[in-house]
Structure formats: structure tokens, C-alpha cells
Amino acid sequence: VLDRNKRMADAIREDLRRRGCFMVNIIGSPGCGKTRLLVELLALIGGGISCAVIEGDLATDNDAQRIRKTGVDAFQVMTGAACHLSARDIEHALEHLSIQPKTLVLVENVGNLVCPSMFDIGESLRIVCLSVTEGTDKPQKYPVSFREADLAVITKSDLAPYVDFDMEACREMISRIKPDLPFLVTSAKDGSGLKELIDRIVAAWRDKQVATD
Ligand SMILES: Nc1nc2c(ncn2[C@@H]2O[C@H](COP(=O)(O)OP(=O)(O)OP(=O)(O)O)[C@@H](O)[C@H]2O)c(=O)[nH]1
Ligand SMILES: [Mg+2]
């Protein structure tokens, strides 16, 4: 299953690359703030970059509706029982979105800190989100999602003081799991770190394009 998924993911990545597009896979626990982060990022990007969103949830199209309110096209994958998106889900979603050349495709994976990290969906950048409300020790308990990520984002930083989250201890834990994993702190509520996150994504896109052109 994983082999077939990987082949399909490679084909998706190559097809997007040829069209000058770039796909980001956003992973994190239920409620860690993935959708709200996307909504705020899209508002900040404005018309600057052409964007499209793929949402993954077991049930409901609530998140796709939240994204569409920003004016950005979104496709909702409802996985039923599956705790992750697969490359086939993405292939299906991409058929339904009309992706212009040079589009940034943002994928919110199913809320889960484990399963989605096992499945390549054809992304070129994988972001793992951890909200401060989940607790400082989560990278240690769920190392795989951090090991497999290209960027770690600590979300809901505005709440850190209220939940006794230790940012430095968390950063250290992550660096023990993957020493070179970049680390960003954001709050979708007060806007901190959002511009830096966009800059990171754009830089990764540019680097990938240069490396493969
Ligand atoms: N204070 C604060 N609340 C936030 C922040 N980001 C998200 N929230 C709140 O956290 C709750 C969950 O946010 P969502 O964006 O729905 O989380 P999610 O990760 O998309 O959830 P699933 O799709 O169900 O996995 C909502 O009530 C948000 O308003 C933040 O930066 N600060
Ligand atoms: Mg969501």
C-alpha cells in the first residue's frame, strides 16, 4: 500500500512541479489550529500568490467552507474512517480544483499527530503543527511526525502563559529528535509569526524550483 502510495505521490509532485506549483502538507492534532492558521495566512497573502486548499477530515466540509469564505477555492476530502490523506485523495481533489500555473496548494491533513506522517501525498514541504495547549512534551511522545517534517510550527502562542507551555524546553526536545528542523512560533489570534511562515514557504518553493529547473 505504501509503495503504491509513494509512486502516486511522486507523480503528483512531478506534475505540480512542471506547472510551477508547490504543495504544502500541514499535519497536527485535532484542534491544534490548522484551519485558523490557513485562514489567517490566506488573508495575509491576499492576491499576492494564487492559492488553493485541500481539506481532509473524517466528516463534514466545515473546514472547506471556512477557507472559501476567504475567497480561496477549497476542496473537502471526507475520509470516513481513515485517519490520514493518501496520494489518491489528493489526485482526486486536484481533479476538482482548477489549479492555475504557479499555484500554492495548501493541504490540511486529517487532525492526527501520527498517521498522516506515514503517507507521502506529493507535497514538497511538510509542516508539523503543535499547539501550546497540547503540552510541552508532545514532540517526545510523537517523534515520528517531527522526524518526517521539514518545518515545525508551534501554534496558539498567545495562550502559552495560560497553559504553562515551556517554549525553550519544547524547542530543545524537537532539536533532539531532528537537529536541523526549523522551528517557528505563531499565533493566528494576534498574528505573530505569520509573515515569517509565509516567507519560509515561499523560500522553500523558490529553492525547490531552482534545484529542479
Ligand atoms: N487563542 C487562540 N486560539 C486559536 C488559535 N488558532 C486556533 N485557535 C482556536 O482553536 C480552535 C481549533 O482551531 P481549528 O483551526 O479549527 O483547528 P484544526 O487544527 O483545524 O482542527 P481540526 O481540523 O478539527 O483538526 C478554534 O476554536 C480556534 O479559534 C490561536 O492562535 N490562538
Ligand atoms: Mg481544521
Image: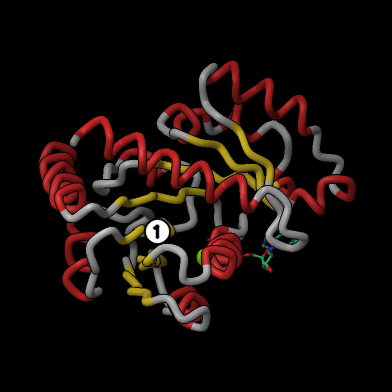
Give the position of the N terminus as an image quadrant: top left
Q: Where is residue 171 in the image (x, y as percent from the top left)?
A: 68, 27
Q: Which of 133 and 141 is in front in this view?
A: 133
Give the residue at x 20% y 34%: 212
Q: Is mark 1 within 8 Å of ligand 2?
A: no
Compared across the picture, whether 186 is left or right of 181 comes to right
Give the position of the C terminus as an image quadrant: top left
Compared across the picture, whether 68 is left or right of 105 comes to right
Q: To which quarter of the image does residue 169 belong?
A: top right
Compared with 50, 123 (above or below) is above
Instruction: Tell me if mark 1 has few (under 14), some (14-19) or many (20+) residues whose alpha carbon lies within 10 angstroms of its own.
Output: many
How many marks the image carries: the answer is 1
Q: What element carries label 1?
A: strand
Give the residue at x 74% y 63%: 189
Q: To which quarter of the image does residue 53 belong?
A: bottom left
Compared across the picture, whether 84 is left or right of 212 comes to right
Q: Position of residue 102 (x, y in %)?
A: 28, 58
Compared across the picture, whether 157 is left or right of 175 comes to right
Q: Name the residue under label 1.
A: 106
Q: What is the basis of the colouring in this image? A: secondary structure
Compared with 83, 197 (above or below) is above
Give the residue at x 43% y 59%: 108
Give the residue at x 52% y 64%: 45
Kind of residue sitting beneath label 1: Leu
Q: Where is residue 153 in the image (x, y as percent from the top left)?
A: 59, 42
Q: Where is residue 149 in the image (x, y as percent from the top left)?
A: 44, 34
Compared with 158, 53 (above or below) is below
